[in-house]
Image (spheres, grey):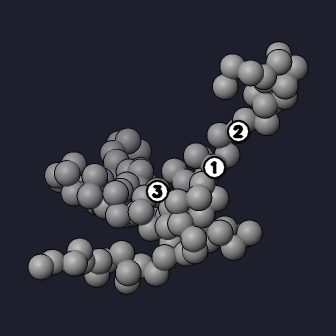
Amino acid sequence: MGDYDEDHAARLYLKATLHPIDRYFMQVRRRLSLAERPIGTSSKAGRTWYGYCVYQPANLAKALEIFRIYYNYCETGKDGSTPAMRLGLAKGPVAPEDILYFMLNQR
């Protein structure tokens, strides 16, 4: 911001964390089988099974976009608010049906 003194800026840097980002990535890996890491086989040949991986990266990009919208607007945290609510982008949690069946007023 430019108007913080050095001590205040240092305290802000100490509060910074990657925990929310790590949590998001963990949820992507756990909830989207397309993004799951490959599984090592039990044989000693060192083979890896890519059973859930996508054959077209565009499909993974579409699934990640849907999950991002769901995570930011539908899923509430311990405080009862969504990430979009914390940033002031939404007034309340949005039902997934409202997002999936959204249509602009067409004339």
Sort mark 1 into few (<14), some (14-19) or many (20+) by Cα contacts within 10 Å. few
Q: How many marks?
A: 3
- Local secondary structure at mark 2: loop
Q: Which mark, by number, is residue 17?
A: 2
Residues at circles 1 and 2 in contact by the CB criterion of under 8 Å:
yes
Residue 38 lies, with reference to residue 34, above or below; the image says: above
- Local secondary structure at mark 3: helix
**Looking at the image, which residue is at 38% across and 41% down?**
46
Q: What amino acid is labelled 2 in the image?
A: Thr
Q: CA distance from mark 1 to mark 2?
A: 8 Å
Q: What amino acid is labelled 1 in the image?
A: Pro
Residue 75: image x %, image y %?
55, 71
* Depth order, front residue of 53/8: 8
**Looking at the image, which residue is at 12% across and 79% down?**
107
Q: What amino acid is labelled 3 in the image?
A: Arg
Residue 40: image x %, image y %?
41, 50
| Residue depth check, mark 3 versus mark 1: number of the one nearer the observer | 1
Residue 20: image x %, image y %?
63, 49
Q: Which mark, by number, is residue 29?
A: 3
